[in-house]
Amino acid sequence: MTISQTTFAFVADLVRRRSAIQLEGAWAPPGAEWLWCASLDQFALFLPAFARGLWRMRVSPVTGGLEVADAVPLGTCQNFPCGSMTNIHGASPDTLWAVGLEGATFRITDAQGAAPGIEIFDSRTWSALYGVWAASENDAWSVGGAGTVRHYTGDARSWDIVDVPTIETLRGVWGSGPNDV
């Protein structure tokens, strides 16, 4: 089963009203089993071991009800800044990029699988990142505070700095292809 916009809207409303988690972004390709979510967890600063900045949900194939799952093992956000995520986008159903406050940048692999992998990357900034768009597994863009623009081109762990003539906060990035961003 795939997740409908109605289901997403219901869960987003539930998250907003009944918890300390503020939904910031979500992504799923057409036909995907899991909807991935990026959120700001108000407790991330005080209880980082229990932070929920990245998570996913689906319609359970067994019960037909909503199933919510942690995207990263509990305790991960104690060592990495993953409790305050702002956006998520996929290059494919199984390779996603997530960005957040303090320049947090993560790649998620096997996103539709039972045990997704998560890797931290060096965005080379402490500015908040608010938007991410992936053209492919080795071509992604992120933007954020004070005109921050970063481009990933396949390096083992870091993103390239892109100089732009602005100091305005950039909140989104999108492209129609790798040569049109």
Image (cartoon, rainbow, N blue to C red):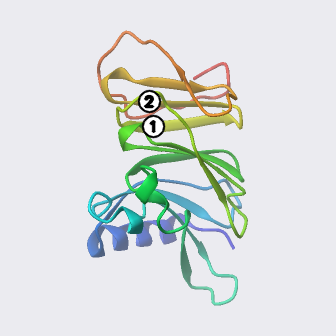
**Position of residue 56 in the picture relative to residue 166 (left or right):** right
Query: Which quarter of the figure is the N terminus placed in?
Result: bottom right
Question: Label 1: how many residues lie within 10 Å, few (<14), some (14-19) or many (20+)?
Answer: many
Q: What's under tag 1, amino acid-wise? A: Gly
Instruction: Give residue 58's position: percent from left, percent from top.
Output: 60, 72
Q: Give the residue at the far front of this rendering.
A: 79
Question: Label 2: how many residues lie within 10 Å, few (<14), some (14-19) or many (20+)?
Answer: many
Q: Which residue is mark 1?
A: 131
Instruction: Give residue 50's position: percent from left, percent from top.
Output: 39, 69
Q: Residue at x 40, y 66 (%)?
A: 49
Q: Are marks 1 and 2 in contact (CB under 8 Å)?
A: yes
Q: Which residue is mark 2?
A: 143
**Position of residue 115 in the picture relative to residue 143 (left or right):** right
Quadrant for residue 16, please give it.
bottom left
Residue 18, above or below 147? below
Q: Residue at x 62, y 34 (%)?
A: 157
Instruction: Give residue 11's position: percent from left, percent from top.
Output: 43, 71
Query: Which quarter of the figure is the C terminus placed in?
Result: top right
